[in-house]
Amino acid sequence: MSKRKVTMAIAYDFDGTLAPGNMQERQFLPDINESPKDFWAEASDIAKKEQADDVLVYMNLMLRKAREKSVPIRRKDFKKCGESIEFFEGVPEWFGRLNEYAKGKGIDLKHYLISSGNAEIFAGTRIAKCFEAVYASKYLFDENDVAQWPALAINYTTKTQFLFRINRGAKDISDNTAVNKYIKKEERPVPFENMVFIGDGATDIPCFRLVKEQGGLSVAVYAPKKKGGKDKADQYQKDGRVHAVLPANYTEGSELDRIIKARIDLVASRHVLDGLLTKGTTGGSPHGLM
């Protein structure tokens, strides 16, 4: 077997993928006395009228509405909003359980979040500590830790940038040199074929396609109890954007659990085979496996 450490990555969207609905709807919008329907409609209208980025608009609207209602918008206030977020079945136990399974196969499994939602709200969730890195929209804060303006907006096209950062090990978002630096495919920390992307919506389509076309696994999930959710996800598969469409059920033995474990097995087996083939090319194998 090759002595090189084998790393595998699972990248996730958040809203509709790990948790039902949008993260802002659990506590932030009720705190500012805004219905989700009205808030998102207003954000969409502004974006359309001003020809602006949807994510920048909703982030700015959150701040403006909170100030109008005198609702505090410090970092700790956003984090507090994340504490009550509920997840799809099995999510809280998913990460540790899969890590142990992968470890038993000789795989170092890492988890990444790539979301248009708020990093500050996500930081308050009970699963935040399970991630190697979090790439989500976030704010600039002043000296009193009060949110002032969007610092990073992640939309459907910019999401793919972070898959390349995972692939190349370029975690520092401010370092554009690292993500564009030429690195031989075999020297990249996380090859795309060792990558899984799990998402649910239209904003995930570029990531679905990129991972699938580069040899990784793309999975669309849907809320089991949401009307029409499966039909939308099925269309992604019909369009050739994902490998599989599954219920957002992360419990042990679920369809999603089985397919991800099968992918871990595949990555582990491929690593063993690569090691044997490499030995064969150097005369180390008597069987001539090339």
Image (tube, rainbow, N blue to C red):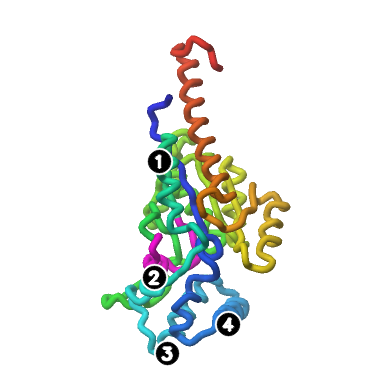
Quadrant location of the N terminus in the rendered image: top left
Numbered range of the magenta stretch: 113-127
Q: Is residue 282 left or right of residue 206?
A: left
Q: Nearer the viewer, residue 258 or 71?
A: 258
Q: Regarding mark 4 in the picture, which secondary structure is present there?
A: helix
Residue 33 in magenta?
no
| In front: label 3 or label 1 | 1
Cα distance in 3D space between marks 2 and 4? 26 Å
Badge 2 crowding class, 10 Å Cα cut-off, few under 14, some 14 to 19, many 20 or more, is some
Q: Nearer the viewer, residue 60 or 277?
A: 277
Cα distance in 3D space between marks 3 and 1? 47 Å
In primary-sequence order, the first of circles 3 and 1 is 3
Q: Measuring 37% from the left and 77% from the top, which residue is drawn there? A: 148
Residue 115 in magenta?
yes
Cα distance in 3D space between marks 3 and 2? 22 Å
Quadrant location of the C terminus in the rendered image: top right
| In front: label 3 or label 2 | 2
Q: Which residue is mark 1?
A: 108
Q: Position of residue 91 (x, y in %)?
A: 47, 58
Q: Residue 103: in sight, yes or no?
A: yes
Badge 4 crowding class, 10 Å Cα cut-off, few under 14, some 14 to 19, many 20 or more, is some
Q: Measuring 55% from the left and 57% from the top, which residue is drawn there? A: 249
- Identified by mark 3, the residue type is Lys
Cα distance in 3D space between marks 1 and 2? 28 Å
Cα distance in 3D space between marks 1 and 4? 44 Å
Identify the residue at the far top of this view. Answer: 286
Cα distance in 3D space between marks 3 and 4? 17 Å
Q: Residue 69 has which mark?
A: 3
- Identified by mark 2, the residue type is Glu
